[in-house]
Image (tube, grey):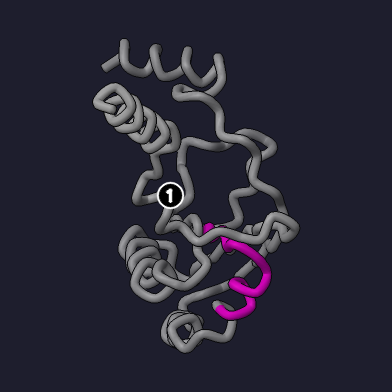
Amino acid sequence: MIRFAALFVVTVALVASAAPVRAEDEAKPKAKKSEPQIGHMVYFKLKDATPESKTKLVEACKKYLEDHDGVVFFAAGVIGEEFKRDVNDRDWDVALHIVFTDKAAHDKYAVHPEHIKFINENKETWAKVRVFDSEFTRTKKKAAGGTEAGKKAAVKNAEQK
């Protein structure tokens, strides 16, 4: 009987540890497998492209647009001044990148009062706005360290510091 109880405890412990769930994975919204995620990329050209104006718009993006239902990725930032290859489109100052779980989450965001408030408070500073919405499916995550090229770049970066 003691052997059976010990075997039972070991089996339960093995099963429980076989599929650990990280709290952050649980908290992330998930799309239905059949629906693509939506990439919402917005590029703002400002009337006044000073560093202060750029920073102000990035902060407004964070304030009004970061915490919406269905957002699985959010980033806002300024144009990278060092990226000046022939293929780089440089006709913008601030970029907003949001990935939604699905189109329904995107559509809810589009009419959300915080989104509308962001537009109303900032639109006078924009010379031009370009919006690129795309559908895509999430690919399997690469093992820690990513691709071989990514690993080599990370090592080279670390060596330079």
How far across and down, in percent of the image, does residue 6 sit?
27, 26
Which residue is more in the foreground, 5 or 125?
Answer: 5
User: Crowding at label 1, few (<14), some or many (≥20) Cα neighbours within 10 Å?
Assistant: few
Question: Is 10 rendered above or below residue 60?
Answer: above
Taking the spot 45% from the left edge, 55% from the top edge, the residue there is 75
Q: Which quarter of the rendered picture does the C terminus lie within?
A: top left
Q: Whole-percent x and y of residue 34?
A: 75, 57
The percent position of residue 40, horizontal first and vertical second, equals: 61, 62
Q: Is residue 148 above or below residue 22?
A: above
Residue 43 shown left or right of residue 27 in the figure: right
Left or right of residue 128: residue 27: left
Q: How many marks?
A: 1
Picture layout, residue 3 above or below residue 83: above
At horizontal 41% and vertical 19% (from top left) the residue drawn is: 154
Is 97 left or right of 130, judged from the image as shown? left
Q: In this view of the protein, which residue sits in the foreground, 37 or 113?
A: 37
Residue at point 43%, 63% (across, down)? 49
Q: Quadrant of residue 1?
A: top left
Query: Helix, strand, or loop for circle 1?
Result: helix
Magenta highlight range: 96-108
